[in-house]
Amino acid sequence: MAVANADMRTPPTATSPAEPSRAVVEWRRERLRRAGFAPAVAHELARDRDADLHAILDLLDRGCPPDLAVRIAAPLDVAP
């Protein structure tokens, strides 16, 4: 039974692709807080447009600890 991904309604729209709107950041932050992330971590992840919220929450639903879920879902560094 999915817990972290429950009630994943569509977030408000971002104002630009490079910078998510305040409403989008707040929506993401609240989802992460409800999934069990500490406030500071949820805030940083919510502001990071490269953080895959759905992947992180899917991992949590499968029993992965939050800190490990973030590390697994983190984008790979691409060499220039």
Image (spheres, rainbow, N blue to C red):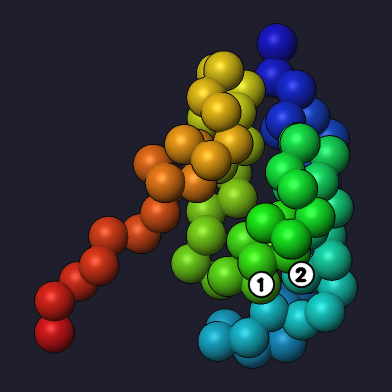
Q: Please tell me how crowded label 2 is: few (under 14), some (14-19), or many (20+) other residues with Cα within 10 Å.
A: many
- Are the residues tagged 1 and 2 within 8 Å (C-beta)? yes
Q: Label 1 vs label 2: CA separation?
A: 6 Å
**x and y percentages locating residue 74 in the rendered image:** 40, 54
Q: Residue 28: in sight, yes or no?
A: no
Residue 47 is labelled as 1
Taking 51 as reference, is 76 left or right? left
The residue where tag 2 is placed is 25
* Local secondary structure at mark 2: helix
**x and y percentages locating residue 48 in the rendered image:** 58, 70
Taking 40 as reference, is 69 left or right? left
The residue that appears at 70% across and 11% down in the rendered structure is 1
The residue that appears at 55% across and 18% down in the rendered structure is 62
The furthest residue to the left: 80
Q: Quadrant of the C terminus?
A: bottom left
Image quarter of residue 11: bottom right
The residue that appears at 76% across and 36% down in the rendered structure is 36
Q: Which mark is first along the chain, 2 or 1?
A: 2
Amino acid type, label 1:
Arg
- The vertical placement of 42 against 47, above or below, is above
Residue 55 is labelled as none
- The vertical placement of 2 against 20, above or below, is above
The residue that appears at 75% across and 22% down in the rendered structure is 3
- The vertical placement of 16 against 5, above or below, is below
